[in-house]
Amino acid sequence: AYFLVEMEIPSAYVQFLRSMMPRKPRNEIYNALGLAKQGKTLFYRDFLHHLQHSSDKFRIAAGIKGMVMLVFDLPSYPYVFKVIKDYFPHQKETTREQVMGKYQLVKQHDRVGRMADTLDYGDVAFPRDRFSEELIAELQQFAPSQLEISDRDGDGRTEVILKHVYIERRMIPLNIYLQDATPAQLEHAVIEYGNAIKDLVAANIFPGDMLWKNFGVTRHGKVVFYDYDEIEYLTDCNFRKVPEPRNEEDELSGEVWYAVGKHDVFPETFAPFLLGNPLVREVFLQYHSNLLDPTFWQTQKERIAAGYVHDVFPYEKGKRFTPGPK
């Protein structure tokens, strides 16, 4: 989360922090200190500089396409660009305004090192010749209200103008990472996935859609959540056990035979969607089987409601500062 630091000379603070984190862009440090406007300005300057010194084209991002967001990237640039689609499949009962509200919730919430930060911009202009034809067709099909292609400045250069776009650090989608992972990498990623969910739970966040594709792996091997359109406060959810079937027809039915409220969640139903891979299943059940138990979720909800604050440490023990000699 942002710190909102009171500083006489912000640039001096940023320079000091960069001496310890030389690979951290200045814009991210300004954002972390609470100076979001300066951070967004610096980011955009760096982005324009990168466009001037590169020649590759924007493309549809790798991974499973989302139902709410259209995501694209530039191969040479370590960020992704996300545009809210104009319409969603029937199973997504949401609106553009609600999706934007979820992203704003994350912006103001303690992200506990497990939710990607986003920069949002309006009326962003990109050079038209840097867009692949496939990406233009995708934008025209799924987000036409957010797209304008014109020579806005009258200088003979055609631009792609997006009315609203979110920008996030690019990560490897967890589902793709697991496909090519070694046994050791797979074990680490699955453990990290469960830890990420438990850190979010500690911060009173229920991810909603917990599929592997909604999590990413950073260059440091950390698993981070980045799909916010279904998140809810944990304390607003009702975690239930699936009722026993009343008869054989219930047991064999392809439809749900019991009443389900808007905020009802059935953790034991996560397994069929998450644990199809036997190797993943073995590791998950060894370290995080409690995520399939409604009692775990309900207990955490009750602790938060009672005012308990759970400490979350963003770094592994070996990477934390340790107390010096007294």
Image (tube, helix red, strand yellow):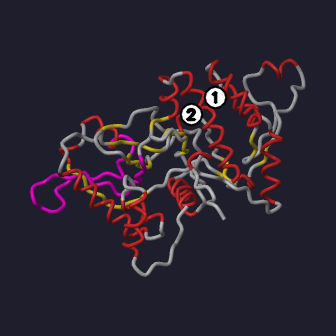
Circles 1 and 2, Cβ within 8 Å, touching? The answer is yes
Q: Secondary structure at mark 2?
A: helix
Q: Residue at x 79, y 44 (%)?
A: 239
Name the quadrant of the N terminus: bottom right
Determine if the magenta segment contains residue 111.
Answer: no
Amino acid tagged 1: Leu
- Per the rendered image, the range of residues in magenta is 140-169
Q: Secondary structure at mark 1?
A: helix
Q: Is residue 75 left or right of residue 246?
A: left
Quadrant assignment, res 191: top right
User: For the residues marked 1 and 2, what is the alpha-carbon distance in whole angstroms?
Assistant: 7 Å
The relative height of residue 27 versus residue 262 in the rendered view (above or below) is: below
Q: Residue at x 53, y 65 (%)?
A: 2
Q: Which residue is mark 2?
A: 212
Q: Nearer the viewer, residue 70 or 173?
A: 173
Q: Nearer the viewer, residue 205 or 127?
A: 205
